[in-house]
Amino acid sequence: MSTPRLPLAGITVVSLEQAVAAPYATRQLADLGARVIKVERPGEGDFARRYDTTVHGLSSYFVWLNRSKESLTLDLKSPRGREILHGLLDGADVFVQNLAPGAAGRLGLGTAALTEHRPRLIPCTISGYGTSGPWADRKSYDLLVQCQTGLVSLTGDAGSTARVGISVADIAAGMYAYSGILTALFTRATTGEAHPVEVSLFEALAEWMGQPAYYTEYGGTQPERLGTQHPTLAPYGAFPAADGRQVLLSIQNEREWAALCARFLGRPELTDDPRFATSSARVAHRDGVNAVVAERCARSAAEEILKELEDIGIACAGVNDVPAFLEHPVLAARGRWGTVDVPGGASVRALLPPADLVGVPARMDPVPAVGEHTDAILTELGRTPDEIAALRADGVV
């Protein structure tokens, strides 16, 4: 039985990428079968390779973001290096870059220069604050954007702000770059027109700030910073159980509130209490609501509470740490773990791509070593072994 053809088989992506946002976008294209050629600096490669050494001596970020890619090393300050890159782009469908502001243009890799003689190429630029406007020349990293969009002001508790625990601005930008590239590929396939794609970390995360932005602009104040509590719903948050574990429960409507009062709290009269009768009233009297729920939770162990809440149809969950997440029964029962080889001969567990395409197997090819595919790619471009040796001796690759 033949293996089904992956959806993006035949699509070639050349990526001048580093850190998180662009590698996340291109890894998802690779997951779907695209050939992704990752262009790295000779010797050191993508600096995200050295963020940490926790995965068999490799960076956890790099292992997560770079499976199923080919690594080509090029010194783009060298004319010969740029010549090789342009040769690659002549046969590519997509070019992705998230270099520092202005760097792509200085290398002759700006969108207009690239597409002038390559009308079918789809360039994708990922920047911090956009390629125009007053902040176009600013460097930007994930936490800076979390701060600039106001996300940090919403995260934490009443006493202190906090960074979101993952690189959420990078991930948002990577997701929009990925979906933008897919849209551009579809448009090219159906109309013949290739549209460049541009995404900024700031504008990607700004979109995700839509609800608190509306709440603030039209409500007059921004949502409170409440830890695990929800600023516009109550009760909604984590409460300590008798065994010291935390249980999170969520009430979304009046039917659920009535069920909670009657069957869990043992206080059916609270359903008609004007302080708690509506969602807005419960938010206004949050302390009172939380005190009643906390008192009840403090009388039972976490598993007992979760069982009772599930039986009456209330959304709930234990508050996991990362080790508990790694052993989550849903991931195990649904077969969501695959295996990916990494440089050095080891292998790691890796989650399958979250979007299942029925009948199409997940691609889980190795994470490349720096420059692992350089000779093979140069050979494809017509370079002889002697020419490749000369390029390597001169530090071009």
Image: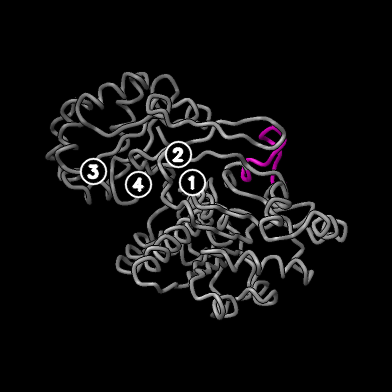
Q: In screen coordinates, is 178 left or right of 287?
A: right
Instruction: Look at the image and give the residue range highlighted in magenta.
Output: 50-62
Which image quadrant is residue 378 in? bottom right
Q: Find residue 362 and name its label.
A: 2
> Which is nearer the N-term, disc 1 or disc 3?
1
Q: Give the amino acid at mark 3.
A: Gln
Q: Give the amino acid at mark 4.
A: His
Q: Residue at x 50, y 31 (%)?
A: 338
Q: Residue at x 50, y 68 (%)?
A: 122
* Disc 2/disc 1 C-alpha distance (Å): 7 Å
Q: Residue at x 53, y 47 (%)?
A: 166
* Disc 2/disc 3 C-alpha distance (Å): 36 Å
Q: Find residue 31 and name its label.
A: 1
> Which is nearer the N-term, disc 1 or disc 4?
1
Callout 4: SS: loop
Q: In screen coordinates, is 130 left or right of 84?
A: left
51 inside magenta stretch: yes
* Disc 1/disc 3 C-alpha distance (Å): 36 Å
Q: Nearer the viewer, residue 98 or 202?
A: 98
**Vertical placement of 54 versus 8: above or below?**
above
Q: Find residue 230 and name its label.
A: 4
